[in-house]
Image (tube, rainbow, N blue to C red):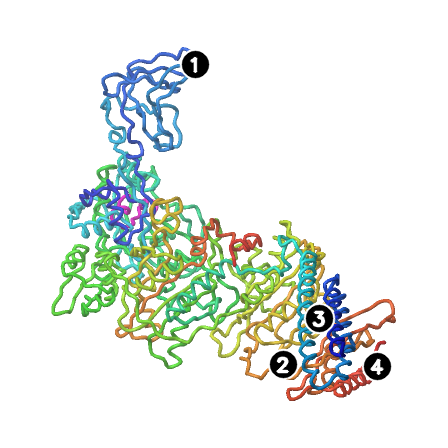
């Protein structure tokens, strides 16, 4: 038997021995040790191959082929053993890491916006999307902006109906807490014109307003949104179009609207606006007093005296305006029965109704 | 205003049903707040004739009745009343009737006896608040007819909300005119011939000194009246319209006011001394009003006076002593026109409202002043006797409310309404009293004397709108302008993201609460007419409101509170060039944290809020808008506890403050858990920067930790600034990762671990780089703070 045959035999022996050892390894660590032992840099295969040097150049490729076969066989055996052991170990780890997914998550509790804030944000967004600019004005107002410029002179009966809060000690001119957001109409128009602009002008003005009235259905502070547009050739039809669009958008369904003639000093003609009852779809319920309609806001075409008070020529321009109570809108949308809940600020209520 | 249908039909022969009339009223601008239908409310109740009455065999207080209601057989009825006898006629509610109190009449069995209806009292019919037993009807009441018809109960009473511009519709006549014009039915002519003067009766001597404020004043004496209660029909009308009968003369005048809209007044002529003048009051002049109030008048109220005293606040209220009583024999009637603004001014000044003032301040119809005088005189003579003298007429109706006819392009109306207005509509306007003509697109409209509210073409557009109805107007969206997109205010949203619940509280607080966080320096804005002491002052801090809300919630088993509010604060003293120079409104956001900020969970223990929870919330909120602030300890912040309070600075500007609430204040709100507040002045914040692009680092950074022993008084911001300086450009971050006081750390010292990151955009840092920088940091700490490196 020549050198080469002996070598081949040794290779075969090594292969059998190693395959058996790989299969016997009980974990990946042992398998690693066995791999090093047979296939490592100083392992048995390397050791064995030192004998190749003694072979003739013709024999070397032959033995080389055998070596490759053995190496491949060992690699396969190693992979197989590794896969088996890996699977088992993975299964063990997974079992050990099992959690009760029904335990509460480790989260920071989020707060919430006040339901009125949601109402203000939603309503304002509808108008900004329709091209209205947001405007603000002071809550402590002079009587010119709150009344006179809005065509409510001092002796006007409507002025007495406003339940105005008056403020002490303003000696230069008497000041009041604004009773509505309509004075922002005047201020926004004044600012707009002072900046050298020409209509069209479209404004949405959300804010707090105050009335000296406090009972089941009245809060001394509440929120309104004033909406108006001034342009050439605006008509009642445009007012109705905007009302229909925004009311349907806010309540999320196509709502019938109804205008009833009414009276506001700052609009002519004036109309109260009703919507088909959102709770019963107009069929008649307790909230709409069986009428199928809900009164939601006051509106009209801006009175020429109001345009005149800021210097807009009412022969050229006309405008529409309306003001809505945010509390009422939110109450209708979310079925909130009592206005006072908004200002009690019970966190349980806020969390349930806000978002 | 209550409008009985029968009264309305006196002026216009309406045939529509109640619901249709209500619809027309609403379309015409007269809001119907409710409709009472007294007759329909007792439908099913019929006149019955008691043909037999025997005691109930098993109940002492019950009777068994046989009642004839005009059917084949009399009804057997068990009745608990005792005031009826055989032969009486009584109201009988038949089976199925629903009475005004909601009771449905059913066939019933009462102690073994079947009852087929119920005999009714006035209370059960809704006619009175109390009654002693059954309503016994007159003996000639026709058996079987509906009681509502027999008693002539009102078919309907409309409860209307008349808008303040329509003084003319504060009368049955005015409403009738609108309805008649609208329907095309005729408005009945109710005018009467003037009462001939009895020459034996003197003409009152009247002097109108204030002609501008009283352009028309009529006075007439009626002598020899016998004032008694007014007759039933007058009382019934007044009651139906919601008014209380007083005495005959007053009732007649009230009825005429409700009918025609012209308020009148009657003086006891024997209590007037000398001539009557319409003049302005002198300062301090006494006046004893009909309602018992004793006033000292200011100078310049418009009054009616005799030669000794003021006998009426013109158009508002007469005096008690000069009023008509049952004992009055001679009267002086007043019918006048007082200028609306003048009545309004005086009425507001004295906070005195009357049916008369409501009409005068809205403007009465000058054309009705004389008519009302004649109608009142006629009725008084008819009902209470007496002789009427000639009328003293001062001024003229023609001079009042004269407006030039309006002339305008008709196009203007149609453009405003967005619809075509058919010419046929003009006829309705004419029937309302307007003079209307159209020619070549121009329209000319004369305004009737009762329409004080109409003065410009736009007012005419409203008339057309209510005649045609808003329903006819289409819905058209205007062309939309493209505008700058509004940048949403994220103030609340960001705070909500950090766990805070938004509250909204009243802008007014109590004076006591105002002093908690702001000094008494004359900046308070105080309400002149507050709802209560608790809502008396405009807030200068957002904290009292939040504290009240925290208390409300803590009282309801909440273990803690995290609240935020955005709003304004209000102070005297304004900024130059601002919209209001007399005061300042500041946009603020305020936070409150109290009690538990973390609850017991399976993974952690509960924890109460501390200063750094509050501070952290502020830091994240600022970071959301690309800002960071320096926190400067300040022991002098009012209402905050020294040592746990700070101001927030951005650049050199103070933008807010934060701190622990003083124990005394916490006590006031009954809160005994750690309580922190913070506030930021939104107007003082710089706009956050829009981030500019910077390439991400390509080369890895190096992180190093160093632990030093500092004095407790060393400030972390100063330490980190020193680290930053020592670290130079390569130091990209440094923060405290560990803080330790206790065993191994000497008294007065604190161990702080500083973790810093080094990074270079152009290369990977070497060991030498980081060793070098570490060494300079160590040196800096030693030099500046004498802080040695710990082991």
Q: Which chain letter matches label 4?
A: B
- Asked whether the beta carbons under mark 2 and mark 3 sit within 8 Å of each other, the answer is no
**Where is residue A101, by image quadrant?**
bottom right
Label 4, on which residue? B786
Which is more foreground, mark 2 or mark 3? 2
Label 1, on which residue? B59
Tell me which segment is drawn in magenta. Answer: B255-272
Same chain assignment for discs 1 and 2: yes
Of callouts 1 and 2, the N-terminal one = 1
Q: Which chain letter matches label 2?
A: B
Which is more foreground, mark 1 or mark 2? 2
Rendering coords of residue B263 (x, y %): 29, 50
Label 3, on which residue? B636
At a point 27% along the width and 66% down the height, the residue shown is A235
Same chain assignment for discs 4 and 3: yes
- Asked whether the beta carbons under mark 1 and mark 2 sit within 8 Å of each other, the answer is no
**Where is residue B378, by image quadrant?**
top left
Distance between the alpha carbons at the discs numbered 4 and 2: 29 Å
Of callouts 1 and 4, the N-terminal one = 1
Same chain assignment for discs 2 and 3: yes
Circle 2: element type: loop
The circle on residue B651 is 2
Of callouts 1 and 3, the N-terminal one = 1
Circle 3: element type: loop
Distance between the alpha carbons at the discs numbered 1 and 3: 85 Å
């Amino acid at each position: 038997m020549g050198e080469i045959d002996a070598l081949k035999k040794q290779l075969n022996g090594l292969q059998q021995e190693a395959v058996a050892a790989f299969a016997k390894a009980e974990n990946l660590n042992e398998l690693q040790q066995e791999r090093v032992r047979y296939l490592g840099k100083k392992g048995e295969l390397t050791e064995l191959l030192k004998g190749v040097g003694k072979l003739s150049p013709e024999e070397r490729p032959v033995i080389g082929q055998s070596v490759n076969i053995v190496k491949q066989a060992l690699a396969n055996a190693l992979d197989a053993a590794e896969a088996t052991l890996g699977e088992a170990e993975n299964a063990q780890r997974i079992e050990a890491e099992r959690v009760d997914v029904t335990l509460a998550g480790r989260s920071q509790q989020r707060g919430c916006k006040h339901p009125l804030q949601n109402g203000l944000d939603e309503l304002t967004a509808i108008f900004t999307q329709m091209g209205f600019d947001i405007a603000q004005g002071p809550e402590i107002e002079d009587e010119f902006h709150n009344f006179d410029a809005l065509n409510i002179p001092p002796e006007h009966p409507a002025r007495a109906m406003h339940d105005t809060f008056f403020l002490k000690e303003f000696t230069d001119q008497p000041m009041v807490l604004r009773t509505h957001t309509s004075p922002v109409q005047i201020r926004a128009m004044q600012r707009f014109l002072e900046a050298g602009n020409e209509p069209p002008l479209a404004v949405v003005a959300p804010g707090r307003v105050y009335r000296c009235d406090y009972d089941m259905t009245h809060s001394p502070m509440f929120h309104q949104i004033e909406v108006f547009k001034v342009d050439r050739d605006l008509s009642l039809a445009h007012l109705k179009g905007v009302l229909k669009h925004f009311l349907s958008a806010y309540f999320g369904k196509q709502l019938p609207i109804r205008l009833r003639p009414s009276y506001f000093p700052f609009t002519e003609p004036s109309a109260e606006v009703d919507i088909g009852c959102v709770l019963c779809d107009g069929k008649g319920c307790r909230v709409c007093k069986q009428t199928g309609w809900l009164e939601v806001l006051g509106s009209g075409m801006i009175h020429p005296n109001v345009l005149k008070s800021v210097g807009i020529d009412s022969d050229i321009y006309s405008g529409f305006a309306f003001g809505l109570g945010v509390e009422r809108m939110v109450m209708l949308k979310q079925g909130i029965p009592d206005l006072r809940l908004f200002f009690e600020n019970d966190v349980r209520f806020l969390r349930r109704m806000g978002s | 205003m209550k409008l009985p249908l029968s009264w309305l039909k006196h002026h216009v022969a309406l045939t529509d049903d109640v619901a249709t009339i209500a619809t027309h009223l609403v379309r015409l601008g007269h809001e119907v707040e409710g409709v009472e239908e007294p007759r329909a409310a007792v439908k099913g109740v019929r006149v019955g004739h008691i043909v037999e009455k025997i005691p109930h065999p098993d109940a002492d207080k019950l009777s068994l009745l046989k009642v004839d209601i005009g059917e084949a057989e009399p009804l057997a009825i068990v009745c608990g009343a005792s005031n009826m006898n055989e032969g009486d006629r009584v109201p009988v509610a038949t089976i199925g009737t629903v009475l005004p109190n909601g009771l449905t009449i059913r066939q019933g069995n009462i102690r073994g006896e079947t009852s087929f209806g119920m005999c009714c009292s006035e209370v059960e019919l809704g006619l009175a608040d109390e009654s002693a037993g059954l309503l016994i009807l007159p003996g000639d009441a026709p058996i079987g007819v509906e009681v509502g018809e027999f008693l002539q109960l009102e078919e309907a009473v409309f409860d209307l909300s008349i808008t303040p511009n329509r003084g003319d519709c504060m009368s049955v006549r005015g409403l009738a005119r609108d309805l008649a014009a609208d329907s095309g039915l005729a408005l009945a002519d109710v005018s009467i011939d003037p009462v001939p003067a009895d020459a034996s009766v003197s003409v009152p001597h009247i002097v109108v000194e204030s002609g501008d404020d009283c352009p028309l004043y009529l006075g007439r004496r009626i002598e020899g009246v016998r004032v008694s209660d007014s007759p039933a029909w007058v009382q019934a009308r007044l009651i139906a319209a919601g008014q209380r009968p007083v005495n005959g003369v007053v009732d007649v005048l009230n009825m005429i006011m409700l009918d025609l809209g012209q308020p009148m007044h009657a003086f006891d002529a024997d209590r007037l001394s000398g001539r009557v003048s319409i003049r302005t009051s002198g300062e301090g002049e006494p006046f004893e009003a009909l309602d018992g109030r004793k006033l000292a008048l200011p100078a310049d109220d418009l009054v009616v006076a005799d030669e000794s005293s003021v006998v009426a606040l013109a158009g508002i209220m007469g005096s008690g002593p000069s009023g008509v009583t049952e004992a009055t024999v001679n009267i002086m009637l007043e019918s006048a026109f007082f200028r609306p603004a003048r009545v309004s001014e005086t009425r507001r000044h004295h906070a005195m409202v009357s049916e008369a003032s409501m009409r005068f301040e809205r403007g009465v119809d000058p054309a009705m002043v004389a008519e009302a005088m004649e109608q009142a005189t006629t009725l008084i003579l008819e009902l209470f006797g007496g002789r009427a003298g000639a009328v003293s007429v001062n001024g003229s109706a023609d001079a009042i409310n004269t407006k030039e006819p309006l002339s305008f392009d008709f196009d203007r109306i149609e453009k405003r309404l967005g619809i075509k207005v058919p010419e046929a509509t003009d006829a309705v306007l004419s029937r309302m009293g307007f003079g209307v003509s159209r020619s070549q697109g121009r329209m000319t409209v004369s305004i009737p004397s009762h329409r004080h509210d109409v003065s410009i073409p736009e007012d005419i557009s409203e008339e057309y709108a209510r005649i045609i109805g808003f329903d006819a107007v289409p819905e058209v969206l205007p062309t939309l302008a493209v505008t700058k997109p509004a940048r949403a205010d994220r103030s609340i949203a960001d705070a909500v993201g950090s766990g805070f619940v938004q509250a909204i509280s009243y802008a007014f607080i109590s004076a006591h609460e105002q002093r908690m966080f702001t000094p008494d320096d004359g900046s308070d804005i105080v309400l002149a007419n507050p709802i209560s002491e608790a809502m008396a002052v405009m807030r200068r801090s957002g904290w009292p409101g939040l504290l009240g809300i925290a208390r409300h919630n803590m009282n309801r088993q909440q273990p803690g509170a995290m609240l935020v509010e955005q709003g304004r604060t209000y102070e005297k003293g304004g900024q130059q060039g601002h919209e209001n120079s007399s005061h300042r409104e500041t946009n603020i956001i305020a936070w409150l944290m109290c009690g538990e900020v973390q609850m017991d969970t399976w993974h952690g223990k509960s924890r109460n809020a501390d200063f750094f929870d509050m501070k952290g919330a502020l830091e994240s909120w600022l970071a959301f808008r690309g800002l960071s602030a320096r926190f400067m300890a300040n022991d002098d912040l009012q209402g905050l506890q020294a040592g746990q309070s700070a101001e927030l600075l951005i650049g050199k500007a103070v933008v807010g403050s934060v701190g622990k609430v003083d124990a005394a204040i916490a006590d006031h709100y009954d809160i005994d858990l750690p309580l922190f507040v913070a506030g930021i002045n939104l107007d003082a914040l710089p706009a956050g920067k829009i981030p500019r692009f910077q390439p991400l680092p390509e080369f890895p950074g190096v992180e190093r930790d160093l632990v030093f022993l500092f004095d407790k008084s060393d400030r972390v911001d100063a330490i980190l600034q020193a680290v930053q300086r020592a670290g130079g450009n390569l130091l990209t971050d440094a923060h405290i990762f560990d803080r330790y006081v206790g065993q191994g750390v000497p008294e007065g010292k604190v161990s702080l671990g500083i973790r810093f990151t080094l990074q270079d955009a152009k290369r990977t840092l070497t060991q030498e780089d980081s060793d070098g920088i570490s060494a300079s940091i160590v040196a800096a700490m030693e030099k500046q703070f004498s802080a040695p490196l710990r082991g």
